[in-house]
Image: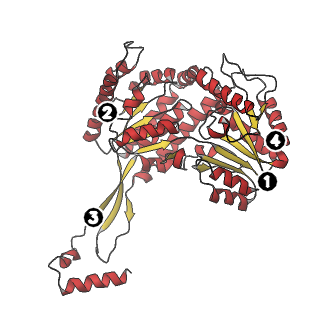
Amino acid sequence: MNEAVEMLNPAANPVEIDSAAIAATLNRAFQKQRESYLADPVPGLEQRREDLKTLKRMLSENLDDIVEAISEDYGNRSRHESLFAEVIAVTDGVNDTIKQLKKWMKPQKRHVDITLYPGARNRVIPQPLGVVGLIIPWNFPVNLSFSQLTGAFAAGNRAMVKMSENSVALSRLLIKISPRYFPEEKLMWFEETGGVGIEFSQVPFDLMMFTGSGQTGRAVMASAAKNLTPVVLELGGKSPAIIDPEFSLEKAVERILFVKQFNAGQICTNVDYVFVHESQREEFIEKSRAWVKRHIPDINSKDYTSIIDDRSFQRLEETLEDAREKGATIVNLSGEQTGNREQRKMPVHLVLDTTGNMTVRNRETFGPILMVLTYKNPEEVIKYINGQDRPLALYPFTRNKELCQLYIDRIMSGGVTVNDALFHVAQHDMPFGGVGPSGMGHYHGHEGFVTFSKMRPVFYQANFTSMKFLAPPYGKFANTVYNFLVKSKS
C-alpha cells in the first residue's frame, strides 16, 4: 500500500490525521502526477486507448467484489441496479469513447481572414489539461467516477479521485486494486476519512469536477477559486415531470415509478415532483398503487435498495411528517407495509395537497417520495417551474409535438427526456450537465473530451505576410488599406 493511502486510510493508520497532514499528502500526490504530466504532456492515441481498455478491465475483472462493496456501503443495493447503472453504463461509455477517440483528437481546421492573412492557417488542437481532481458522491460511485475518468483519460490527463464518506467499502477496494492497473502517476483514489474533501478542493488542479449538493458545490467552487482552478459542477435540484391528459396515464405512471423506485429514488436526475391534470388525480393514485403492488410486493426484498444511511432515512421520515402535520395528503403506495428502520427500507410515497411552507416543496427529496401537483393548463405548469431554481432535468409526457416544444422552449433545465425519465443521462453521444443552481459544464461523449481538454487555438503564419506594409510610421498606403477594410467590413 502506498504512503498516501496509508496516511488517509484509518484501517492502515488509526491515528487521527490533522488537516496539515492531509494537505501535505494530497499535494505530494498532485506533484507526483504533475511531474509525470510534464515529462509526457501529450500521450498518443494508442496510449489513451490502452488506458481506457485498462479502466474497463479494472471494472470487469473485479465485478463481483465491486458490486458487493457497493451493496455493503448501502446496507443493501440491488445487484441488478448496480449492474445496469454502474457496470453496463460505464462499459458502454468506454467502448463508445474508444471508437470515437481518433476523430476527437484530430486538430480542427478553422477559417482564416485571407484579406489580412493570405496563406496562413488556423487550427484548434485538443491537448491534455494535466492533472484533474474528481469528487465523487455515494449514489452511483462507480458510474460517476469511471465515466469521468473515461473523459479524463481520453483527453490524456492524470487523475486524483476523492470518494464519499458513505463509500468506505468501495473506496478501500479501489485503493487496493488500482495499483494493479495504473501507476500512481496516472491514477490515485482517496477515501474520505474526515477533512479530506476540504483539503482536496484546495489542491491546484488543472480542472476539478464535483458531483453532489448545491451547498457543498458552492464551497468547492469557493476553494477552487483561490487557485483559479476551473470547476465543473454536477448538482441536483427538483426535476419535474408533466403528464399531458391526452397521454396514456398508465404508461406515464409505469415509467415515472420505475425511475422513482430505482436506487430507492436516490438519483440527482430523478423525478422529484409530477404535474398531473386535475381531472386525473385520483386515477393517478390508483394506477400508482397498482404498479407498486405488482412490482414491489415487499420492500424488504434484495431487489429493493436501502436508503444510504440513518441520517438520510430520518430526513425522509421528517419530510413526510412535516408535510402531514401541515395538512398534506400522504399515500403509502405499499399499503400497510411501513418503513423498515433496521434495513433502512422506505416504501414509495405520494405527497399531495402540499403548500409552499412544506419541506417537500422546497428541498430535493432524494428518496422514494414523489410530490404530486395538479394543474388546469400548461401556463400554470410553466409559471410554477420557472418560479423555482432551474432543474437538472425536465420530463414532459405528451404526444403533442407543439406542447412538447412549448415546455422545452419555456422551461430551462439541464437536460430533457420526453415521454420517459432519466434516460437522456445514459446516452453516450449526448452531453450531461446542469444549468444555474443545478450545475455548470458538461461531460459524457465528445463534450466530456472537450471539457477535459484545452482546446488550444494555434495560428500558423504564412511565409509572406502583408502586415509588414502596414507598420508605422503610417502613411498614405496604410490609410488607404485601413479605410478600405473599415468600409468593407461595416
Q: Position of residue 118 (x, y in %)?
A: 29, 75
SS state under label 2 = helix
Residue drawn 47% across the image and 21% down it: 173
Q: Amino acid at mark 4?
A: Phe
Task: Decide: few, some or many residues near mark 2? Use Cα within 10 Å; few <14, some 14-19, many ≥20.
Answer: many
Q: Which residue is mark 4?
A: 284
Question: Left or right of 21: which side holds 476?
Answer: left
Task: Decide: few, some or many residues near mark 1? Use Cα within 10 Å; few <14, some 14-19, many ≥20.
Answer: few
Alpha carbon distance from label 4 to label 2:
53 Å
Q: Amino acid at mark 1?
A: Lys
Corner quadrant of residue 19: top left
Alpha carbon distance from label 4 to label 3:
63 Å
Q: Which residue is mark 2?
A: 30
- Mark 1 or 2: in front is 1
Q: What is the basis of the colouring in this image?
A: secondary structure
Alpha carbon distance from label 2 to label 3:
34 Å
Q: Which residue is mark 3?
A: 460
Q: Amino acid at mark 2?
A: Phe
